[in-house]
Image (cartoon, helix red, strand yellow):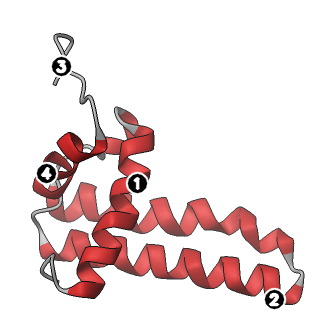
Amino acid sequence: MDAAGRFRSFKEFYPFYLREHANSTCRRLHFVGSTIVLLLLITAIARGAYGLLWFMPLAGYGFAWIGHYFFEHNRPATFKYPLYSFIGDWAMYRDMLTGRVRW
C-alpha cells in the first residue's frame, strides 16, 4: 500500500479481495452472477440481441451485493476500488473453477 492507504497493484489487492469474500455463500453468489453475465454476453452476441447487455451489470453486481450485505456483512470493495474489484471478480471466478478458491 502507498502512504495514502491505496493498493499499488492488483497483486497486492487480491489477498485483500479474497479476505472480503471469506463467506462461501457470498463467493457462490458472485460465481452465479458472473456466470449469468457470461451467458448474457454470449446470448447477446449470438442472437444480435444487444439489449441484453443492459442486464449484465444488474446480474453481476446484484448477486455480488446481495452476498456482501446479507452474508458477508461488509461493504463491497467495488465502491472504493472499482477496477481492482472488477478484475478480482474474474480472478476469483477463475480460481473457483480451478479449485484454488474454495466453493
Looking at the image, residue 42 sits to the left or right of residue 50; the answer is left
C-beta proximity under 8 Å, tags 1 and 3 = no
Q: Quadrant of the N terminus?
A: top left
First in sequence, mark 4 or 1: give its number.
4
Q: Nearer the viewer, residue 46 or 10?
A: 10
Looking at the image, residue 76 sits to the left or right of residue 83; the answer is left
Q: Which numbered tag is attached to residue 5?
A: 3
Q: Residue at x 80, y 80 (%)?
A: 45
CA gap, disc 2 and disc 3 = 43 Å
CA gap, disc 4 and disc 1 = 13 Å
Q: Amino acid at mark 1?
A: Ile
* Disc 4 residue crowd, few under 14, some 14–19, many 20+, Cα 10 Å: few
C-beta proximity under 8 Å, tags 2 and 3 = no
Q: Quadrant of the C terminus?
A: bottom left
Q: Nearer the viewer, residue 88 or 67?
A: 88
First in sequence, mark 2 or 3: give its number.
3
Q: Amino acid at mark 4?
A: Pro
Residue 16 picture location, percent across and down: 14, 46
- 37 vs 21: above or below: below
First in sequence, mark 4 or 2: give its number.
4
